Image: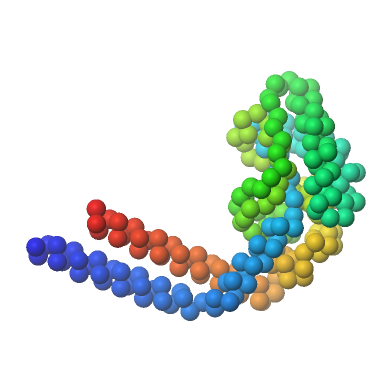
């Protein structure tokens, strides 16, 4: 009985300490966190990403992925570069889906492989990713994906709308001014500021810090749940 009582006391002290830490984190400005989340949600709905996923991480499969990328972009670039909105880009991608798959299959066969090719256009969850001078937050993005073979390898990706894939694929990077120009056609100044790596304002840094702290708070709450489960087990 004494052992049980001691366990209960230790448990309650632990919960108290976690609750105290939690309270401090709750001092983070809730409005700032909500503002950041709203910006992220808006960005997700205004872009179409392009991903080419390799069969594996072997050098051969990764090189094949880049060859497929180059030929597909060579074909689709003239059709997408003057697109005026996301609906038009989506329509162009759908109309050319069969042709893109044929191009990918042809490149694969010419290089001595017999991998199948799958293409999809839909929403996928992606982690935080840097692209040139911008960083896209984690979230569900609309993406056109070319999956080669088993699709177990690393992927190459870019932003298909607005058409940033076609600025400088040879170097694998895009000029900042071109990025800003294209992104601001579809994003507000505030939304672009949130993903801009070069001219982030103090306010943007505060938002990121607030989200970071809020994440720590969430982890503490999960830890509390874990402690409770262990106690009753």
The residue at the far left in this view is 1
Who's the residue at 20% across and 69% down the image? 9
How many marks on residues? 0
Residue 216 vs residue 8, the one in the foreground: 8
Who's the residue at 66% across and 72% down the image? 204
| Image side of residue 70 versus residue 209, left or right | right
Asked whether residue 170 appears in the rendered view, the answer is no
Q: Quarter holding the N terminus?
A: bottom left
Who's the residue at 70% across and 49% down the image? 142
127, above or below 181, in the image = above
| Residue 120 % position (x, y) | 70, 39
115, above or below 27, in the image = above
| Residue 167 % position (x, y) | 85, 50
170, above or below 67, in the image = below
Residue 93 vs residue 52, the one in the foreground: 93
| Residue 75 % position (x, y) | 87, 37
Q: Quadrant of residue 14?
A: bottom left
Q: Quadrant of residue 162?
A: bottom right
| Residue 137 % position (x, y) | 64, 59
């Amino acid at each position: 009985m004494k052992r049980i009582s001691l366990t209960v006391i230790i448990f309650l002290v632990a919960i108290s300490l976690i609750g105290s830490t939690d309270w401090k984190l709750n001092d983070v400005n809730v409005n700032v966190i909500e503002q950041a989340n709203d910006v992220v949600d808006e960005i997700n709905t205004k872009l179409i990403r392009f991903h080419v996923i390799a069969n594996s991480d072997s050098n051969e499969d990764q090189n094949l992925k880049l060859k497929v990328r180059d030929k597909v972009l060579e074909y689709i670039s003239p059709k997408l570069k003057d697109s005026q909105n996301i609906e038009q880009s989506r329509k162009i991608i759908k109309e050319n889906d069969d042709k893109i798959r044929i191009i990918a299959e042809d490149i694969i066969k010419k290089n001595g492989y017999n991998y199948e090719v799958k293409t999809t256009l839909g929403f996928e969850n992606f982690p935080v990713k840097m692209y040139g001078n911008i960083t896209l937050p984690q979230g569900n993005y609309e993406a056109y994906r070319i999956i080669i073979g088993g699709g177990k390898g690393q992927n190459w990706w870019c932003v298909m709308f607005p058409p940033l894939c076609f600025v400088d694929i040879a170097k694998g990077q895009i000029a900042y001014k071109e990025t800003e120009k294209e992104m601001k056609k579809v994003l507000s100044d505030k939304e672009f500021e949130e993903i801009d790596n070069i001219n982030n304002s103090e306010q943007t840094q505060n938002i990121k810090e607030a989200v970071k702290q809020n994440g720590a708070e969430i982890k503490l709450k999960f830890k509390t749940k874990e402690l409770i489960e262990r106690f009753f087990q």
